[in-house]
Image (cartoon, rainbow, N blue to C red):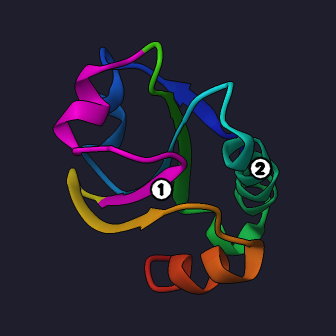
Amino acid sequence: MAVEALTDANFEEKTKTGVSITDFWAAWCGPCKMQSPVLDALAEDPNFANINFFKVDVDENKQVPGDFGIRAIPTLVVVKDGQAVERLTGFHNKEQLSEILHKYA
């Protein structure tokens, strides 16, 4: 599964059921550029087939990042059935994210 870009308009619908991880990012953000391939690799990992991987560009979408109080990027938010259950700020490598996601897989 690929990482899907979400917007303010479809975020709630896409995250209301199941488990997802959303990367709040911006094109100008260096650490965000490092985080993206890590999420791409995890999205392809069969161990996480039941987790949806999303991205929200904070420059193009203001409502959802505001609702989550995103003040630094990259920020990763794990959502289970519409409720945030975990929040990570800053770059996280594949091993770190894998360990966290195994709790929800």
Residue 3 found in image quarter: top right
Residue 12 appears in the picture as rendered: no
Asked if marks 1 and 2 touch (Cβ < 8 Å), the reply is no
- Residue on which disc 1 sits: 76
Residue 101 x %, y %: 54, 76
**32 left or right, relative to 55:** right
Residue closer to the observer: 73 or 2 = 73
Magenta segment range? 61-79
> Who's the residue at 52% across and 81% down the image?
100
Task: Mark yes or no: residue 84 visible.
Answer: yes
Q: Nearer the viewer, residue 53 or 91?
A: 91
Q: CA distance from mark 1 to mark 2?
A: 13 Å
Q: Quadrant of residue 5?
A: top right
Q: Amino acid at mark 2?
A: Asp
**What residue is rendered at 79% in x and 51% in y?**
34
Which amino acid, by three-letter code, is at mark 1? Leu
Position in image of residue 97 (x %, y %): 62, 74
Q: Which residue is mark 2?
A: 40
Marker disc for residue 12: none
Vertical position of residue 9 compared to residue 105: above or below: above
Q: Percent position (x, y) of residue 29? A: 66, 36
Disc 1 element: strand
Q: Judge whether 10 appears above or below 65 on screen.
A: above
Mark 1 / mark 2, whichever is N-terminal: 2
Question: Which residue: 76% across, 41% down?
Answer: 33
